[in-house]
Image (spheres, rainbow, N blue to C red):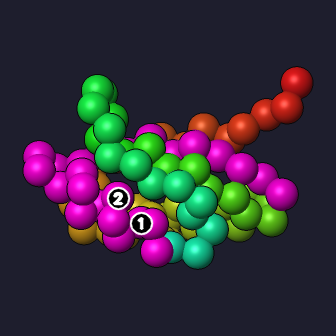
Amino acid sequence: MVQAYILIQTEVGKAAAVAGHIRGVTGVTLAEDVTGPYDVIVRAEARNVDELGKLVVAQIQGVEGITRTLTCPIVHI
């Protein structure tokens, strides 16, 4: 299982709607609108890195209002 945080920037005023939409995406375990340089922080999980990439590109980046994403895989050191 691969887990990651996905940091999202949105168009002005779209953070709550983006977070609400993303909460319903399969593989997303948490989606919160926040303040700071990013507008939404998502925690997601997938079977492997390829599935995580598909989740981000096909499911999350296509949400209306998103301008940029940064995916940060979780590592266990």
Which region shows up in magenta? 1-24
Disc 1 marks a residue whose amino acid type is Ile
Q: CA distance from mark 1 to mark 2?
A: 5 Å
Q: Is residue 45 visible?
A: yes
- Badge number at residue 19: 2
Residue 12 against residue 59 in the figure, above or below:
above
Give the image location of residue 37, x and y in percent.
30, 27
Secondary structure beneath label 2: helix
- Give the residue number, with chain letter if any, for mark 1: 22
Does residue 34 appear to the left or right of 59 in the view shown?
A: left
Residue 50 against residue 32 in the figure, above or below:
below
1 and 2 marks in contact (CB < 8 Å): yes
Give the image location of residue 57, x and y in percent.
50, 64
- In percent of the image, x 63 and y 68: which residue is there? 27
Disc 2 marks a residue whose amino acid type is Ala
Give the image location of residue 35, x and y in percent.
27, 32
- In percent of the image, x 33 and y 65: which residue is there? 20
Instruction: Identify which residue, 53 or 22, lies in the foreground.
Output: 22
Instruction: Identify which residue, 12 or 19, lies in the foreground.
Output: 19
Magenta span includes 10 = yes
Question: Image quarter for residue 1?
Answer: bottom right
